[in-house]
Amino acid sequence: MFAVELASEREASVRLDGRRLREQARRERIFNDKLRTIGVDTEAFDLQVKERRDQEQREANELNSCAEEQMRCDRLACVLQQRQKKDERSLNEAIVQFRQDFQHPSNRREFDLNDPELLRKQDESQYEQMRLSLDNQALQLQKMEEQSKKAASMAAKDFNLALAAEMTQRRLQERRDEEENNQTEIFNQLNGDLLMETPEQNRTLMEQRQKDLQEHHERMMTARAALLFERQQERINKELRRQMDNANAQLAQAHEAQSEKSKSEDLELVQRLRRVEEQVQELGLTETEQMDAEKLFQDFGYNVFLSDRLPLNRRIPDTRDPRCSLKIYPKDLPTISLILIYLNEALSVIKRAIRSIIDKTPAFLLKEIILVDDCSSNEDLQVPLEEYINLLNNGKPNLIKRVRHRRQMGLAKARMSGWEAATGEVVAILDAHIEVHKDWAEPLLARIKSDRTLVLSPVFDKVHFDTLEVMEYYPSAHGFDWNMWCLYESFRPQWYETNDPTQPGKSPSVMGILVADRHFLGEIGGLDEGMSVYGGENVELGIRVWLCGGSIEVVPCSKIAHIEREHKPYSADLSKPLLRNALRVAEIWMDEYKSNVNIAWNLPLKDHGIDIGDVTERKLLREKLKCKPFKWYLENVYPQLEHWKHVLAYGVLKNELQDGYCVDQGSVPGSVPILYGCHYYESQLCVYNHNGEIYVGGIKSHSYNANRCLADPGSGSTPVLHSCNTAEERGMSVSWDFTQGKQIRNRKTNRCLEIDTGDDSNYFLVLQRCTGQRWTMQHVMNDF
């Protein structure tokens, strides 16, 4: 064994030996007669003082060293904490960027109710039934068209034969009559004179003339009947062609849903060309012209080729309630400036909008038309448009003005550029792809004359993007959901109780086209120019108007026909700017309710990594205007918009055994939830609330829509999805005990939601006796 001597023990031993030697020396000085001196042993005291000071110095050095080490550790902890926050923010930014780049909402099933791939995402049996039904319908329509053509051909043939026989008989009769008349005339010329003609002879001549006139009238009536018959046949054929086009369009959607994406695009092009085949034949287009027409459609999102061939002052149906035409408006209405916003719009569409405004707006009310070009690149919108404007301004100088941006600034800034250039008492901010109806301006101006704090919207009729036909839309209020997507809402019950559909109705928001007093719009801050590109600016304006002293109405007697594009060519994915704008609106106006926007977009409440711009100025505007809180808006203006105040956690729901898979609502939407690869869109958005309910497939923004609850049916091993009320009525249990990172257990049946594998090694959801499988939900709002 070896003895190990510690350093501390050696130091103590040295100090002890030193004390012994000093004590020995002291004793010799005091008790040794030869060396003893009388007085205080100052040397010993000095040594003790020195030792004490040395000890205090060592202790102070140790304390300083400890303090420095502690400060170094604190700085290191702060650096690590900042690095962790930076990493979390970078990760969130990467997740958001990944979703925006590779997980577009257009790929999800719920993105569009008119999803062309809807049939493919449904069951195969439903697809087959729909396809067979459409095939049968197409065959029936084809047979009807053939029968109609045969009947029309036979009727036309019989009519032509009868007409030819009648004309032959008439010509023979006319020839015989003419010969008789000639013989009579020759006899009279030879044997008589004017004085010898009797009244009977005069009467005979008069009767002959009346007979000729009657025959001429009959011929005209026969020709008119033939013309009416041809027009009626044309209408029948047109209706049959329209039905055939609809059937072909539905068949095209069914076939597209069963093919790959690339093939579906080709099929869509073929079907579109088929739908306009008759139009092409009538116009006598070449193959090159047909390709040009399709390219124009892809560039603009509507049928520009047809628009270029329609008259600028074409007649559109008056879809207003008949009582609107009986209303009488004051003569001293305010003047109006119309602002048309466009970006690479078709020239003929802009011309038609201008023409309809000039033709259908009283000249004494129309102050000016302001065209705001948000940096268009189309050559047609340069010199050709300028020439058309100059032509119109020759008749009325300064009627049409142009504002052109040198760079694209977005919808909100473009509208504000038009507002700044306006001089009329009222401004109407419109899209450039519109046509106004008869008497559209007077109802709006009369309302603003009675109350300048009103912001109004006309009713939009739909102009079909392909046929450019005007389709009637009925008056509705304008609303939105927590994603800030616009939607139509019902008016308040009081509006329906009046039983007068011509009365204006209150609306929570506007859908972009608006009419307002120019000065009032400036007083409340115009439009938020911090909004980017498109989306959310109309919702922000609607909220601000209501909270800051104004109100919004939809005026049924004012109608505008608006082209609804098949696609928006200026932005492939509008969700990215809309997400940013939605977060900006929430931060400025929604107070404690702004978390609903994060839940709707499946974003964390903090550090979501999205720059919403500087909102200081808009918050100062809110304070300056002394606006009401957002709670007042929900209670008094838009009570249908439901606040998710009892949400504990939200996001995708994952099992620790397979964290690359998430709980999904299934097919569109299915009654059985599935386990599917995580894509983080609405079909996988789950919500856990304080009642223990788990919503799958998102949470509904409005109180009149039912959420879909995860339920245990009590029998079998498969979980189901039903409306929460429906599930409870059927005796199913929708309440679950769930703690983040632990099992999900049904409160009634004590069975757990877990995952299992089948014979094909694929994972699926099961309800079974709890085995301790752990689940996590993406975002936690409150500890539970």
Image: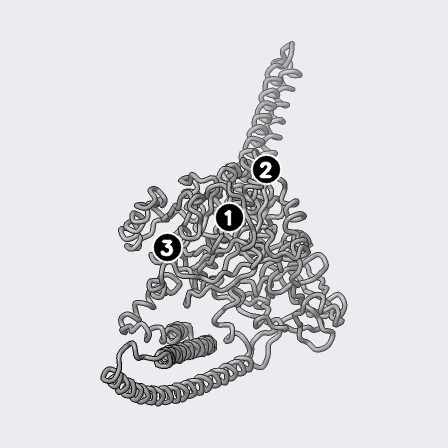
Please give the residue where the numbered disc 3 appears in the rendered image: 350
First of labels 1, 2 by sequence position: 2
Relative height, residue 556 to residue 19 (above, below): below
Q: Which mark is residue 442?
A: 1
Relative to 253, 40 lies left or right: right
User: Given the current orientation, which residue lies at the most extreme left position?
Assistant: 190
Residue 175 position, x and y percent, is 28, 87
At label 2, the amino acid type is Ser
Asked which quadrant contains residue 242, the reply is bottom left
Residue 264, image quadrant: bottom left
Depth check: give the residue in front, 136 or 761.
136
Q: Residue at x 36, y 76 (%)?
A: 278
Q: Judge whether 214 appears above or below 73 on screen.
A: below
Foreground disc of the pair 3, 1:
1
The residue shown at (37%, 49%) is 374
Tell me the residue that label 2 is attached to. 8
Q: Specify whether residue 290 is in view.
A: yes
Type of residue at label 1?
Answer: Glu
Label 2: few (<14), some or many (≥20) within 10 Å? few
Residue in the foreground of this view, choosing between 228 and 705 = 228
> Horizontally, is 161 left or right of 191 in the view?
right
